[in-house]
Image (cartoon, helix red, strand yellow):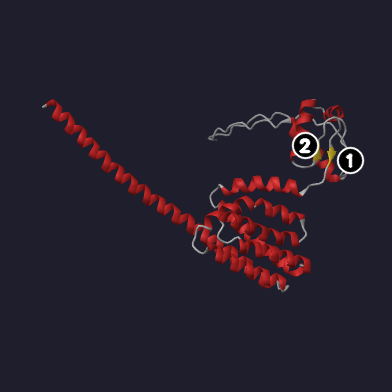
Amino acid sequence: MWYALGRRPVESSIKEENSVTEKPMKRRKRSHDVVDEIEKLIDSGEFALGDQLPSEKDIAQRFGVGRPSVREALFLLSQQGLVEINNGTRARVTPPTPKLIVQQLSSISKRLSTQIQGQQHVEEARLLLEAGLAWRAAQIATDEDIVRLRERLDANIAAAGNVVDFIQTDIAFHYELAIICRNPIFKAIHEVVVEWLIDQRTTSSQMPDASSFSIHAHTAIYAAVAAHDPVRAYHEMASHLQLVSRLYHEAKRLSETILRSAMRDVAREFESEKQKIWKNTVAGLTDDQS
């Protein structure tokens, strides 16, 4: 039921003896209160999927807030995928979509991957996801699914030697397993790791024979799915991703080591040249003075 939001009382800070002075918390915006209440109404079923919300004016009156707060609340709700806002019409309750899941998870994964151990967390999540996809695909794959998966494998094999094409066909092979599972959430989550996957593939592909290792693994995964052997499919995918992870980190380590060594060599050479230039300059000045 709609009801007015009472104003939050301002609590006075209590200073205890020998306590550490703390920064006062910022007052919560009224628009966030409106978001919370509308979410409760949606969760309770009072506003079902497809229902239109009351007008901004009506919401403002019933919640005891200004219309700017209502507009901001509706915008926040639309960002969360709970309502849809179209010009000239009232906001409408919408169901969550795979696209929304992709946007939200992509933002989260990007932030996590930049943190300490973030890379490891992304790798672990991907391993469990894709090994599970291989398991499920082996259980339910139809003859048509297996034909498409074989086409993806053949395209990947044909792309060996071309880094860009190989990476694209590699990703397509993995994505096909998500398609076989027929679950839009799986496809959405898979899309989240694609950007990171491209970075990993680009780095690990610099290792000698890296494409051969991937093709061998993809062939084994395909064979397990085609044989409807979920345990084997899970094992082959997990082993494949673990090897790719090791190649990735080793390639990163070697790149850093080689670059560091090259920088030292260039710095020493430059320093030597600089000293020679300085000595020649000083010698020239000495000759001019004499």
| SS for callout 1 | loop
Q: Residues within 10 Å of mark 2 (few under 14, many from 20)?
A: some
Residue 91 falls left or right of residue 113: right
Q: Is residue 46 above or below residue 15?
A: below
Q: Nearer the viewer, residue 252 or 74?
A: 252
Give the residue type that dot 2 points to: Val
Is residue 142 shown to the viewer in this render?
A: no
In the depicted structure, whether residue 288 falls above or below residue 39:
above
Residue under pointer 1: 51
Q: Residue furthest left?
A: 290
Q: Position of residue 279 (x, y in %)?
A: 20, 36
Using the image, determine if residue 54 lies above or below residue 224: above
Query: Which is closer to the viewer, label 1 or label 2?
Result: 1
**Residue at the image point whose x is 70% and y is 64% from the top:** 151
Q: CA distance from mark 1 to mark 2?
A: 16 Å
The quadrant of the picture occupied by the C terminus is: top left
- Displayed quadrant of residue 13: top right
Considering the image in quadrants, where does the N terminus appear? top right
Is residue 192 in view from this perspective?
yes
